[in-house]
């Protein structure tokens, strides 16, 4: 099956000069890695939250969102994640893409200029039309949730 290609205009801000554009790191990768556009190293102590700039703005096409997600390698090796995972860049937002990193690990973590800190995925977003009703169709699961499945 042939994959669709969607053009995404990006503006490179002065503090991202010299950094690579986001890129797929393998042929089958779903996300493009985002780079830290920090001027100097940022130390994230355990439990700390920091807003990290990417130096990029994007014109997300109508009907899409950019999802900003954690990188699995940073998560497993250092406990680094995104506080609002996944983050959303809406089609009408034109500000800089920034990443809310959190250190859930036991040790301080240093973010340096050019580090790959997150990944972005362009996702189609259908519009939802809510249909108020008095009853919903029944399922085998019913109202069971929050750890309910797979417990029998």
Image: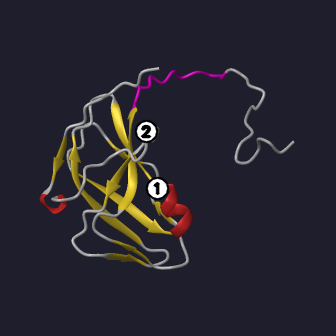
Looking at the rendered structure, the secondary structure element under dot 1 is loop
> Looking at the image, which residue is at 25% across and 36% down?
8
Q: CA distance from mark 1 to mark 2?
A: 17 Å
Q: Is residue 25 above or below residue 106?
A: above
Q: Residue furthest front?
A: 27
Q: Residue 71 shows which numbered tag?
A: 1
145 in relation to 100, above or below: above
- Please name whichever residue, 109 or 101, is drawn nearer the observer in this view of the structure: 109
Up/down of 78 relative to 30, above or below: below
Q: Which residue is mark 2?
A: 27
Residue numbers of the magenta segment? 124-136
In the image, taking residue 58 as reference, residue 121 lies left or right, namely: right
Mark 2 element type? loop
**Disc 1 crowd, CA 10 A, few/some/many (<14, 14-19, 20+):** some
Sequence-earlier tag: 1 or 2: 2
Where does the image place residue 40, in percent across and percent down from the top left? 24, 75
Q: Is residue 52 magenta?
A: no
Determine crowd level at label 2: few under 14, some 14-19, many 20+ residues with C-alpha closer than 10 A: few
Q: Main secondary structure of the magenta part?
A: loop
Residue at 46 percent of width and 79 percent of height: 108
Q: Is residue 37 left or right of residue 148?
A: left
x and y percent of residue 85 in the render?
Answer: 46, 52
When asked about the image quadrant of residue 4, the answer is top left
Quarter of the picture containing the C terminus is top right
């Amino acid at each position: 099956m042939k994959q669709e290609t969607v053009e995404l205009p990006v503006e490179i801000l002065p503090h991202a000069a010299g950094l690579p554009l986001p890129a797929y790191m393998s042929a089958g990768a779903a996300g493009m890695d985002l780079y830290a556009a920090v001027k100097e190293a940022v130390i994230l102590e355990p439990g700390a939250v920091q807003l990290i700039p990417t130096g990029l703005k994007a014109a997300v096409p109508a009907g899409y969102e950019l999802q900003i997600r954690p990188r699995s390698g940073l998560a497993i090796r250092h406990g680094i994640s995104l506080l609002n995972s996944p983050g959303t860049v809406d089609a009408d937002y034109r500000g800089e893409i920034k990443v809310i990193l959190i250190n859930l690990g036991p040790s301080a973590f240093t973010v340096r200029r050019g580090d790959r800190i997150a990944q972005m995925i362009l996702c189609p977003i259908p519009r939802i039309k809510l249909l108020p009703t008095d009853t919903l169709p029944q399922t085998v699961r019913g109202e069971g949730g929050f750890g309910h499945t797979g417990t029998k």
